[in-house]
Amino acid sequence: MNTVAWQWVACSPADPPRSPYGSASPTPENVARITPYNIKMATTIRPATAADTALILRLIRALAAYEREPDAVEATEDDLLRHGFGENPYFQCLIAELDDQPVGFALYFYDYSTWLGRPGLYLEDLFVDPPFRGHGVGKALLLRLAAIALEKGCARLKWEVLDWNQPAIDFYQSLGAEFLDTWRNVRVSGNALRRLAGDSSRSAEPAQPPRPGQQVTQ
């Protein structure tokens, strides 16, 4: 088990550089360097910038392949740029670097608990390239996410895990994570979402001919 040390750079420029999409570039005060004492490589956790969209998309595709859905990713670099680094971003992202080489990421956004009356942090994706696992990178990402959740006044940090991913389940249990087995995920998407919204004109599903004996109403 690695002992982890946090090393924060103290200086802070008065006017941090900004990306053309309105998102501040990482400044020294929001970059965490984590160095396990028993290995030589240092893990850096930094906020993603607009320049990282190609990297983020590569890691998303690698995660999809690991989760046995290699063809499921429809997102593009333009999607990530528009939705993550515009004036009103839908998500935020952390990049993990091992000796200055990008090796993983965590993509997250905020939700809200009506029962607790406080926001929460929802982790959509967490992934570390397989050759760089075993160096504490995934734990370093979760440590930083937990710190961000507390900084933002969040009541909890939550995410999902596939039921066959036992190594991840064991890892999360070791961190004290709670598994909500009595709850089921519910999702409406695609044509079902359009039908639910009453927008049948945009449905991509072809009309089906009536079955024999079926009554057709207008």
Image (cartoon, rainbow, N blue to C red):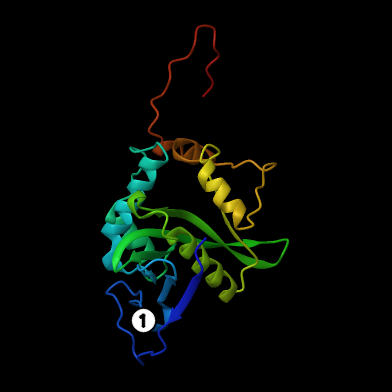
What is the quadrant of residue 25 in the picture? bottom left
Q: Amino acid at mark 1?
A: Thr
> Residue 190 at what x, y percent from top left?
44, 39
Give left or right: position of 48 versus 146.
left
Judging depth in this view, the residue of 66 and 39 nearest the camera is 39
Residue to which mark 1 is pinned: 27
Local crowd at mark 1 within 10 Å, few (<14), some, or many (≥20)? some
Q: Residue at x 43, y 67 (%)?
A: 38
Q: Secondary structure at mark 1?
A: loop
> Residue 201 at what x, y percent from top left?
41, 37
What is the quadrant of residue 121 in the picture? bottom right
Q: Residue at x 35, y 77 (%)?
A: 26
State the residue lying farthest toward the bottom. Answer: 14
Determine whether 205 is above or below 20 in the image. above
State the residue lying farthest toward the front. Answer: 38
State the residue lying farthest toward the right. Answer: 115
Judging depth in this view, the residue of 132 and 78 nearest the camera is 132
What is the quadrant of residue 83 in the picture? bottom left
Total numbered circles = 1
> Residue 129 at what x, y percent from top left?
35, 52
Q: Residue at x 37, y 33 (%)?
A: 204
Determine whether 201 is above or below 100 in the image. above
Q: Residue at x 61, y 51 (%)?
A: 173
Judging depth in this view, the residue of 75 and 194 nearest the camera is 75
Give left or right: position of 171 versus 16.
right
Determine whether 17 is above or below 158 in the image. below
> Residue 139 at what x, y percent from top left?
49, 61
